[in-house]
Amino acid sequence: MNETDFLKEYDPDAFRRPSVAVDLVLMGIREGRPTVLLVKRAQLPHAGRWALPGGFVGIDESLDAAAARVLREKAGMAHAHLEQLYTFGAVDRDPRMRIISVAYLALLTEQAFDAALSAIPALLPAAIQVPWAGEAGGPVDVLSPDKEELTLAFDHAAILAMAMLRLRGKLDYSDVAFALLPELFTLRQLQDVHEAVLGAALNKPAFRRRQLDKGWLAATGAHESGAAFRPAELYRFQRSTAD
Amino acid sequence: MNETDFLKEYDPDAFRRPSVAVDLVLMGIREGRPTVLLVKRAQLPHAGRWALPGGFVGIDESLDAAAARVLREKAGMAHAHLEQLYTFGAVDRDPRMRIISVAYLALLTEQAFDAALSAIPALLPAAIQVPWAGEAGGPVDVLSPDKEELTLAFDHAAILAMAMLRLRGKLDYSDVAFALLPELFTLRQLQDVHEAVLGAALNKPAFRRRQLDKGWLAATGAHESGAAFRPAELYRFQRSTAD
DNA sequence: CCAAAAGTGTTGAGGTTACACCCATGT
DNA sequence: ACATGGGTGTAACCTCAACACTTTTGG
């Protein structure tokens, strides 16, 4: 039997299969805090609870494509930094049936974040309150715009906690911070992003030099406008040619 | 309609679903090199090719449980450090049908590695040759015991590359190195593990002090026996009480 | 001229590397 | 006694954080 014949006779329905979904942590920085976009579940189970936007993975759709589709459909967004986080596969994580969820982290600029909010009014921007701001990962509290504490549906709180952890861990050796900033930004804005993610204040001159020494920043010569005081220079993210 | 009624009427078979599998990177250190255990595929597709041991996820089995089961069934091992790596979900990664694979990294001591080899003779210990030893991740070459270069089945080479990257990345801020060593070990053995994973030589006194300063090592007072020269002290991995 | 934030120079502390040396053991 | 690897002390070096200072703008 050759490979082609084998494939013809193979029965893909021999075993019961779990469903596979993707869930997206849509994260941006608002008012100095990491903030995520949540949707209110209209249907059972967990009707009325807030949840991460998600959707099932189509049979002819890669995981990355499914994540991009959910980003498009549920947040009206064409592009965003999107990376796979972790796969959650506890048997009872969804009471309907067995659903394995591949969680993705999507990083949004403030503009993209606000655009999604006005395009799709059902989205709720929820601030993430990290208990021990400087330290390692534990449970995260999620606050609605009027400071109510929210209980998320399913295991989405655990997904969120992992997203925060990942974002922190990658902050200074990768380019994730720039995915949260517009094309042109000042060093102060970059520092604000770092401080929001870390939940801690940073030393200005040290931060500045460390960032410039990495060689990832290209000075544009242009300066911000409309500042009440001395306008800061605008930089652009650009990997050094040495890479 | 309340939640119970809703669940009764829910049809879990409304959509076609992909299959979900786990694949294990069983890694240990042999002869100063990271080495993985491979199985020869008996059946199509990719019959005759070497592959990572894996299996389908049961409908009532969590992902972690499935990984543990494969570890038991395919490597005859009760326990090992096991951590989820990444989920591979390209549409065409398996020609039979849509299979999403959750990859796990399993870390084996040299004893466990050898035990698996003698318990299950079908396993092949394949050394991993990392092209640019000190640097970041790219493709990895896999060598059979007689130094033949192997072509792995499916996308398993990519899984392996990611496993090496993860192991390197976690080497000095986590306890993964100790999962590759027996209960009691010398500082030289610990350094050998680090050097094998990093593919680079390390400075002895610096390494020694860094490890001791972490507070993860407990001196036992016992010394290794059978050494041709001065016997080294044996240490045990033990997180500091301050954690 | 003042307030406020941008941007720079200098210093000092801490940690890490590199090298040299001493120690313990089997032959 | 000696070869060999285990284990330790010291000094040079590098990195980075803290502070003070200058610069630039709007009012």
Image (cartoon, coloured by chain):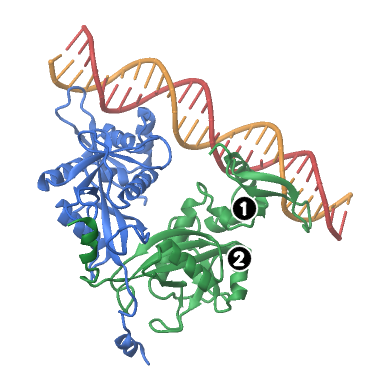
Chain colours: A green, B blue, C orange, D red
Q: Chain of mark 2?
A: A
Query: In the image shown, does A95 or A20 lie closer to the viewer?
Result: A20
| Residue located farthest toward the bottom when viewing the structure as drawn | B1
Three-letter amino acid code of the residue under disc 2? Ala
Dividing the picture into quarters, in which one does residue B57 lie?
bottom left
What residue is shown at x 55% (from left), y 79% (from top)? A122
Left or right for B87, reference A68: left
Q: Which mark is residue A205?
A: none
Dividing the picture into quarters, in which one does residue C22 lie?
top left
Mark 1, residues whose alpha carbon is within 10 Å: few (<14), some, or many (≥20)? some
What residue is shown at x 57% (from left), y 44% (from top)? A239
Query: In the image shown, does A238 or C13 lie closer to the viewer?
Result: A238
Counting from the top left corner in percent of width and height, residue B7 is at 32, 85
Left or right for B202, reference B221: right
The answer to the question of whether label 2 and label 1 lie on touching residues, with beta carbons closer than 8 A, is no
Callout 2: SS: helix
Three-letter amino acid code of the residue under disc 1? Leu
**Vertical arrangement, residue A123 with respect to residue B164, above or below:** below
Between disc 2 and disc 1, whose residue precedes? 2
Task: Kindly report the distance in space between the C-alpha atoms of the residues bearing marks 2 and 1.
Answer: 17 Å
Counting from the top left corner in percent of width and height, residue B67 is at 24, 58
Query: In the image shown, does A125 or B52 lie closer to the viewer?
Result: B52
Tag 1 residue: A190
Dividing the picture into quarters, in which one does residue B56 lie?
bottom left
**Vertical arrangement, residue A2 with respect to residue B211, above or below:** below
Can residue A139 be seen in this snapshot?
no
Mark 2, residues whose alpha carbon is within 10 Å: few (<14), some, or many (≥20)? many
Q: Chain of mark 1?
A: A
What residue is shown at x 61% (from left), y 52% (from top)? A191
Give a yes or no on whether discs 2 and 1 share a subunit.
yes
Tag 2 residue: A112
**Vertical arrangement, residue B193 with respect to residue B18, above or below:** above
